[in-house]
Image (spheres, grey):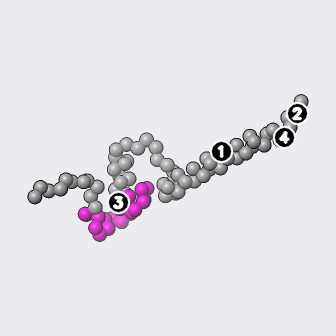
């Protein structure tokens, strides 16, 4: 006994929506990482280096091959110190 194709249209629409959402999220993640693959299993060292790269280049996954830091980076410290007592 044949199944009428009209009964399969909602399943096709659902499959198309899941595919479009998956492709969109994958593209968004790829774009967010600067065109590189997503990183997995990050430890403290990786997070620290990514923070440093963010402060150096402005991108989370950006890297610089310059031998010297840009001007003003010596004052760009991620540590927050408490204010002095006066």
Q: Residues within 10 Å of mark 2 (few under 14, many from 20)?
A: few
Location of residue 45 in the rendering, given as x and y in whole percent from the top left corner: 34, 46
User: Considering only order in the chain, which callout, 1 or 3, is on the residue closer to the N terminus?
Assistant: 1
Residue at image mark 4: 5
User: Is residue 68 visible from the viewing direction of this image?
Assistant: no
- Cα–Cα span, label 4 and label 1: 20 Å
Q: Which residue is mark 1?
A: 18
- The residue where tag 2 is placed is 2
- The residue located at (43%, 56%) in the rendering is 61
Q: Is residue 43 visible?
A: yes
Residue for point 42% across, 60% down: 59
The answer for how far apart the CA atoms under marks 3 and 1 are is: 37 Å
Label located before the other in sequence (2 or 3):
2
Residue 41 magenta: no
* Residue for badge 3: 55
Q: In terms of depth relative to the viewer, which is nearer, 76 or 81?
A: 81
Mark nearer the viewer, 2 or 3? 2
Give the quadrant of residue 83.
bottom left
State the residue at coordinates (38%, 53%): 50
């Amino acid at each position: 006994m044949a199944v009428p194709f009209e009964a399969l249209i909602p399943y096709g629409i659902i499959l198309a929506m899941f595919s479009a959402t998956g492709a969109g999220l994958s593209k968004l993640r790829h774009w967010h990482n600067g065109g590189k693959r997503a990183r997995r299993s990050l430890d403290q060292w990786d997070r620290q280096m990514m923070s440093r790269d963010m402060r150096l280049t402005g991108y989370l996954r950006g890297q610089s091959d310059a031998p010297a830091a840009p001007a003003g980076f010596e004052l760009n410290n991620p540590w927050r110190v408490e204010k002095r007592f006066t």
